[in-house]
Image (tube, rainbow, N blue to C red):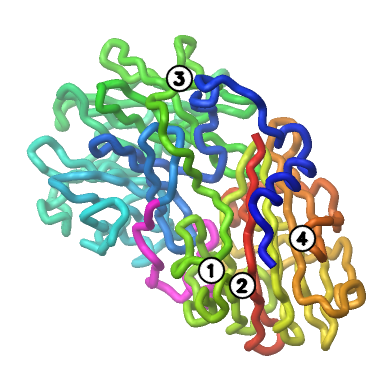
Amino acid sequence: MKKSLLTMAALLATTLGSYAQPTATTPAAKDMIENPMLWADVPDPDVIRVGDTFYLVSTTMHLMPGAPVMKSKDLKNWETVGYIFDRLTDSPKYDLLEGTVYGRGQWATSLKYHDGRFYALLAPNEQGAMGDTYIFTAPKAEGPWTVHSRLRHFHDATLFFDDDGTPYVFFGTGEMCQLTRDLKGVVEGSHRHYFQREADERGLLEGTRVIKHNGTYYALLISHVYAPGRHRREVCYRTRDLNAKWEKNVILESDFGGFSYLAQGTIVDTEEGDWYGIMFQDRGGVGRVLTLSPVRWIDGWPQLGDEQGKVPAQMRPYKSGQPTTAIVKSDDFSGEKLDLCWQWNHNPVNQAWSLAERQGYLRLKTNRVVPNLYLAPNTLTQRMEGPTCSAVVCIDYSHMKDGDCAGFAAFNGDSGVLTLKKKGKATYLEMSEQKVSLTDREKAVTNVDEKMVEGIALTKLNPKGKQVWLRIDGDFRPGHHDVANFYYSLDGENFQPIGTKGYRMQFDYRRLFMGTKFAIFSYATKKAGGYIDVDSFDYKRGE
């Protein structure tokens, strides 16, 4: 039986505490843009404007479909409207066979609009042919997108069309080259370094984004500086002639919200000629969040931040009266297609999931015997969000087979996991802490350390029952240590805590390189053929 969202909202407000309660605000306050603009894992952004609409693309690496495209009219309300590709097929690693692509795959996509078409350039963070650059094109941002060409690897690259249509790629640390007009090759002899990094910039300058304004070219890059008194920052190089010398300036060096310094992103203008900066900040377990800043043009440089050069906590609304949208959503699985808010962990096995076999439910069928969650196909994910969030899944587990594992997780390299385990005819619910070990090169799973914290015999508690409700609460408020708490219910109303209280969620760039995700999973450890039916995913974000 499905629970109404009104019931869920009341339940979650009670359990999350006062910060989940709605507060009376004036209309103007409600319209304010709060930073982080997107308090979720949305790294490596590129943002463009076409007409009155802003489009944003981000990195999702091993999640499929990949390279999500989001749109907004007001720089406050964003929604996912499509993906640049459904799956990548260069290697069986994308299918969780012969290794994995955790923390690899699609990185730092560049989005452009030129001569009535959208273009996207991305280079997977891989070696050899797997790392060759893709250029995709589409008639509209929502798609359909098609592969236009494959080129050599360009790290953290941006595609740029000059006023006369000449295409370029800017990439790496100060490298650039000209592309052929058909975007299918590199013009011979055009590769060059357009700047050399300074002595104290021992890290890469990367995440290049290039715009042209009033006849001047601007290249924006993140600078990892290790000199005393210097911080991570956004720098800008400019020139009026691509063959001439480029000047340099620091355009943002700001901490924000109790976290360290931020950088990497781009700037974008409005129809009225105002400019905004979109940069990401590392925020621990939730991942890399997006901030919005005003841009002040000073002496021909785009300076980000307020008058003190800091990212503001709030910004005046760019445009009022827009409908509220979100990139993380509840879902009752009643649609004919899977909602765009969902992404699979690696390529899905399409014949092993269905929205049609039982109307109003997502069916996840086991199709491959695997030893652990990190190799399980068809794990379905959505981002977790700050400042707080909570989600409940309702699962019919009556068709699981001996050895099957299914459930709900706060999924990352270190995961807090609620697992339904079928052992013979009995079903158990366990809360465990799981930690994956991966090889550096192939990202092969070498070990999963699973610590079972608490378990219950679900069959004994509810001998005639078929459904269970599993809930995960996340708290990413500064000073609250990125914790998750876990609950279960046999009726969808009365929830009992289980397992670790205050499980610490972590971000680890060496393994999955992502913020923690809600994950629904079902896999077989003995024999394929069992399945679960997911009735609903009910989500609430705290204020």
Q: Nearer the viewer, residue 428 or 62?
A: 428
Q: Vertically, is 131 above or below 504?
A: below
Q: Nearer the viewer, mark 2 or mark 4?
A: 4
Q: Earlier in the sequence, mark 2 or mark 4?
A: 2
For the residues bearing labels 2 and 4, Cβ distance under 8 angstroms: no
Q: Residue at x 32, y 46 (%)?
A: 110
Which region of the structure is painted magenta?
Answer: 81-104
For the residues labelled 3 and 1, the Cα–Cα distance comes to 44 Å
Instruction: Find out whether residue 209 is within the magenta segment.
Output: no
Q: Which residue is mark 3?
A: 316
Q: Which residue is mark 2?
A: 375
Q: Which residue is mark 4?
A: 492
Is the residue marked by circle 4 packed among few (<14), some (14-19), or many (20+) residues within 10 Å? many
Amino acid carrying mark 1 in the image: Thr
Amino acid carrying mark 2 in the image: Leu
* Quadrant where the image shows the N terminus: bottom right
Q: Nearer the viewer, residue 401 or 363?
A: 363
